[in-house]
Image (cartoon, rainbow, N blue to C red):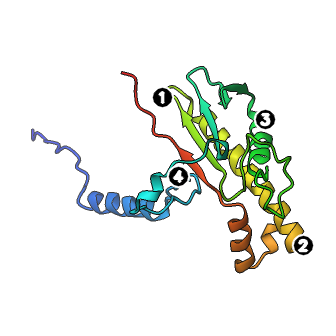
Amino acid sequence: MKSFRRHAASVNAGSMADIAFLLLIFFLVTTTISADKGILRKLPPVCDTPNCTADIPERNLLQISMNDNQEIMIEANTVKLEEVKDIVEAFIDNNGSNNCDFCEGEQLSNSSDHPKKAVISLSHNTLTKYDLFIAVQDEITSAYYDLRMRYAKQVYNKTPDQLTKEELIDVQKAYPFIVSEIMVKRSN
């Protein structure tokens, strides 16, 4: 009697590496990688002159700070997030020196002289939540946008999206976006 030896069945895996490589290339080509979006903010140019650190008169500086309790303080008064925009608008558009013909402010003695001299100082604690910091920045940006929109309607009778490039530059010069962010030091 003959004994039959069975050989184990084998699979030809020679082309398995080729298939895996082709699948890898397929997924790399067809997959889209989402790009993170940041805050659209133009950084100020590098200043090489000593006047960049010049003293700003107290009346032309609006101090906004956020603490570790997630409270917003403007000039040492606690305010709500919804109030920030109106306070910033009133401060920038004050016309304290009475030489701004397009300003509609109340000419208070403790607010800015002119929109070109108004500086918003933004500071925060190391424990301030990122969401609050961004929300306050959005309110400041919204205040500037509303003032610029009003100026564009008064002077050019257009909305900001209808302005030419030259007109847009003029509107931005009338209400320049001047925000100073104070570097926070850790208390550890």
Camera-near label (1 vs 4) is 1
Q: Residue at x 41, y 31 (%)?
A: 185
Mark sitting earlier along the chain (3/2):
3
Camera-near label (3 vs 4) is 3
Q: Secondary structure at mark 2?
A: loop
Kindly report the distance in space between the C-alpha atoms of the residues bearing marks 3 and 4.
30 Å
Q: Residue at x 55, y 22 (%)?
A: 68
The residue tagged 4 is 36
The residue tagged 1 is 126
Dots 3, 2 in contact, CB < 8 A: no
The dot on residue 41 is none
Mark sitting earlier along the chain (3/4):
4
Camera-near label (1 vs 3) is 3
Q: Nearer the viewer, residue 51 or 185?
A: 51
Dots 1, 4 in contact, CB < 8 A: no
Q: Residues within 10 Å of mark 4 (few under 14, many from 20)?
A: few
Dividing the picture into quadrants, the one containing residue 102 is bottom right
Q: Residue at x 65, y 55 (%)?
A: 117
Camera-near label (1 vs 2) is 2
Identity of the amino acid at label 2? Asn
Identity of the amino acid at label 1? Thr
Is residue 17 toward the left or the right of residue 178 in the image?
left
The residue tagged 3 is 83
Q: Nearer the viewer, residue 8 or 69?
A: 69
On the rendered image, what quadrant is the C terminus found in?
A: top left
The residue tagged 2 is 157
Q: Position of residue 104 (x, y in %)?
A: 87, 54
Mark sitting earlier along the chain (1/3):
3
Q: Residues within 10 Å of mark 2 (few under 14, many from 20)?
A: few
Mark sitting earlier along the chain (1/4):
4
Q: Residues within 10 Å of mark 1 (few under 14, many from 20)?
A: some
Is 167 placed above or below 140 here?
A: below
